Amino acid sequence: MGAKKLISNQSSLNGVIKVPGDKSISHRAVMFGSIASGTTTIENFLPGEDCLSTIACFRKLGVTVHRDGSDVTVEGKGLSGLQEPETVLDVGNSGTTIRLLMGILSGRPFHSVLVGDESIGKRPMTRVTRPLAQMGAKITGRRDGEYTPLSLSGGALEGIEYKLPVASAQVKSAILLAGLQASGETTVIEPEKTRDHTEHMIRLFGGEVTSNGNVVTVKGGQQLTATHVNVPGDISSAAFFLVAGAIVPNSSIELTNVGLNPTRTGILEVLKAMGADMTIEEYESKSGEPAGNITIRTSSLTGTILSGDLIPRLIDEIPIIALLASQAEGKTVIKDAAELKVKETNRIDTVVNELRKLGANIDATEDGMIIHGRSGMLKGETVSSHGDHRIGMMLAVAALISNGEVYLEQSEAVAVSYPQFFTDLHSLFL
Ligand SMILES: O=C(O)C1=C[C@@H](OP(=O)(O)O)[C@@H](O)[C@H](O)C1
Ligand SMILES: C=C(OP(=O)(O)O)C(=O)O
């Protein structure tokens, strides 16, 4: 596909957007529905490519999944209902799919081969396979098990106590999913608290899990029961419009049904700290997850520091926060974010290189970046998502404050987490 001409130089953005379902929760709803007994119904499922990869993998494991847009039905037959797949399980671009799936498959007495796209082939897997092997799974892979293709034979597992070397909800979740099938108890200790959707989901499906600060414990041998999951909107998708509303002149955007789980709302804290004009109206939680409406208006912004335990609560929002910071007064420093290097792309490099092309004043550091604010209007250039959905959407928002023509290569990557992104963005110009 050729480069996409982005809309640039906008004088205002106005409107209401219902952001699509949360990606993390949509993956987990299909996974838990598949290992529970009975029919699970999912409302507001995200039909993004990553979550469709999860559905495709579970179908190959013998689970019947019906989908009509964002309504999904999963016919679960319990963990023992999963069958050995006849062909390889392809996770596409999705790190969440491969890592959580390994946790489930570790306790199943059959063999599977897991593959993904070129980006997945560069993402580290021993962070998951090491604890799962300690519990009893047999997993091998390219380069000493670090990369796909991976080959996994599951079976009887033993519970462990495991201290995570990195703050990762995917690793925590994989261990908990294996722990549900293991003998005894499994405990995960996190260096910083990460998103807790797996813990919520275990409870929603009738299971038990205890969380005490950064320590999470599950008992093995639990049976889960099908339920209804109402997926709130994805704050990571809302983030692109929160920033667009804050930096494009004369704007006011209302985002409805945004998931407000406190392990995900770091971006709201950053917006507040920088002086954004924002109102949040929280309402009754859906399926155990809080949600609400957020209105954002243009305002003047000041630089800030992002570090420590805030980072896991906004890890996927850092690319768009870098753009936000380029329009603030003063310097913004992002540190303790080396995890960005092992996402769909090395997001420290892709953010810095692509925003520099548009004229932003931004430097890479070992574990983050430094953004010198008040870049003012950006300029026209051809930029690339490098196949990374979050980079593509960040650049489309950057184009709105560019005074030249901006072209985006590999724009189709946005469909990984937000297939309707360009349609929703364009609705704000009318
Ligand atoms: O558990 C999840 O759903 C996710 C966890 C995060 O990854 P890590 O666990 O690698 O930090 C995040 O970046 C990803 O988009 C989704
Ligand atoms: C890192 C991401 O997803 P995943 O790890 O599931 O590929 C993301 O969506 O930004």
Image (cartoon, rainbow, N blue to C red):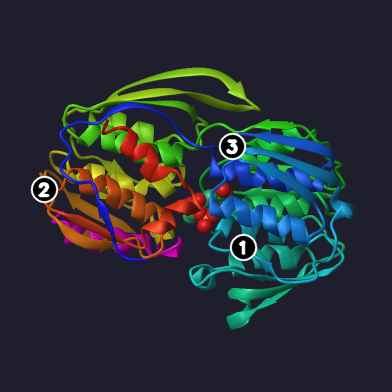
| Residue 95 in view (yes/no) | yes
Left or right, residue 331 beside residue 91: left
Magenta segment, which residues? 341-362
Find residue 27 and report its horizontal and vertical position in percent: 63, 47
Q: Residue at x 51, y 33 (%)?
A: 233
Circle number at residue 205: none
Which residue is the site of mark 2?
403
Q: Quadrant of residue 58?
A: bottom right
Q: CA distance from mark 1 to mark 2?
A: 39 Å
Which residue is the site of mark 3?
213
**Was residue 211 drawn as part of the magenta stretch in this picture?**
no
Left or right, residue 119 beside residue 116: left
If you read the primary sequence from the N terminus, does the residue marked by circle 3 or circle 1 appear first?
Answer: 1
- Total tally of numbered discs in the picture: 3
**Was residue 359 drawn as part of the magenta stretch in this picture?**
yes
Which residue is the site of mark 1?
91
Q: Residue at x 27, y 37 (%)?
A: 244
If you read the primary sequence from the N terminus, does the residue marked by circle 1 or circle 2 appear first?
Answer: 1
Q: Secondary structure at mark 1?
A: loop
Q: Secondary structure at mark 3?
A: loop
Frontmost of labels 1 and 2 is: 2
Asked if the residue under mark 1 is in contact with the one under mark 3, i.e. CB atoms within 8 Å, the reply is no
Three-letter amino acid code at the position of disc 2 = Asn
Find residue 82 and report its horizontal and vertical position in percent: 84, 56
Front residue of 97 and 190: 97
Q: Residue at x 17, y 39 (%)?
A: 328
